[in-house]
Amino acid sequence: MKRLAFGLMLLASIAARASGQGSTAEVLAQAHDFYEQLEVERALPLLRQVVSPSWPFEVTADQRVEAYTYLGACLAFLGKTDSAVVYFRAALERDPFTDPDPGQFTPAQRELFGRARRLTFAVAARRVAATRIDPRTEPLTLVIVTTHAATLRVAIRPVDAPGAVILLDGASDGLRELNWNGLLSDGRLAPPGRYEVLVAGRSRLLPRADSARVYFDLRHDPPPLADTLPELVAADLLPERLPESAAAGDLAKGLAVGAGAFFISGVLANRELGGSMAAGPAVIAGTAAVAGATAFLRLRRRPDVPANVAANARRRAERADSNAAIERRNAARLAATALIISPAAGIGP
């Protein structure tokens, strides 16, 4: 029986921890109801439980900030101003964006919260929301905050590459929106990757400094691009040089003609035909041999075919012009590339 009871207690404990998020939310809701009914003395112990190190359930960062804020408000309502400021400062240190709703907090409570702001220096950047932007027409909006007047520097930089885009370098106080057009400092479209938003500030009221970082991932969503035409290959071009065999062929032709002429000359010079007609073929033979040799030497010295060279040059120029036009159209399309932004956690890719 004791073992059974112990097992049931263990299961109950595990179930309670598993439902801790709900338990914390329920306690905060109950404390909020008491506060609304001005039963702050009943709300205080519930709120103290939530921020206590011994509280057995999970408490998110937002829930802890809410508990500290309402603790400060309850103590301010009871006239314990110094304690109220302490809890307000605890809320601001965890979330500088904390700002009591005028509909739920009295001017006196908000005045004490303002005092806490002046005594606490913290900066923050709001988590970047998932969005899709066209850099030509709409920027990415970043929201930053300081608890009081400060000298602030806000930069965006890729986490895996040098260089940063400075969005603000000067005075700032409270909540502020900054816009980024998606371009790097050299005017190029930011490449895909992980980016860091770094907020670094120095208080103008206190000898203190603070910094904060948030991360986001950036992807490109470009329009479809056209492919450039491939380079011309040998099969696309006319031959620009005659082969060496052409020169040898012309020489061979000349020699063949010459040999034939000499043969005819020899036949005509036969005593049976008489020798008066032998000189003509001999001249022809010599001329043919000389012409063949001349053609051989000319082709060896200048084997180019000018007409083909000019025709190929025109083809290459036309291909280059076509590719240049395609590249210009692609560049115009790339200028319309959209940026896909999504929040990221961590400190690197």
Image: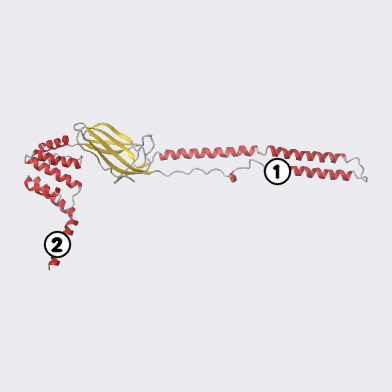
| Image position, residue 303 (x, y; %) | 67, 39
| Image position, residue 187 (x, y; %) | 38, 34
Q: Secondary structure at mark 2?
A: helix
For label 1, count other residues whose C-alpha is less than 10 Å away and answer few (under 14), some (14-19) or many (20+).
some
Q: Residue furthest bottom?
A: 1
Provide the residue designation for mark 1: 246
Foreground: 254 or 196? 196
**Residue 103 visible (yes or no):** no
Foreground: 302 or 307? 302
Please indicate whether residue 93 sits to the left or right of residue 38 in the image: right
Which label was assigned to residue 173? none
Please indicate whether residue 283 sits to the left or right of residue 57 in the image: right
Amino acid type at image mark 1 = Ala
Which residue is at a point 12% across and 67% down the rendered structure image?
2
Foreground: 315 or 53? 53
For label 2, count other residues whose C-alpha is less than 10 Å away and answer few (under 14), some (14-19) or many (20+).
few
Tell me the CA gap for discs 2 and 1.
104 Å
Which residue is at a point 16% across and 57% down the rendered structure image?
16
> How many dots with numbers?
2
Foreground: 237 or 164? 164
| Image position, residue 297 (x, y; %) | 72, 38
Please indicate whether residue 160 sits to the left or right of residue 320 in the image: left
In the picture, residue 76 is in which quadrant? Answer: top left
Judge depth for marks 2 and 1 and give the one in front: 2
In the picture, residue 308 is in which quadrant? Answer: top right
Upstream in the sequence, badge 2 or badge 1? Answer: 2
Amino acid type at image mark 2 = Met
Image quadrant in which the N terminus is located: bottom left
Q: Are marks 2 and 1 in contact (CB under 8 Å)?
A: no
Which label was assigned to residue 9? 2
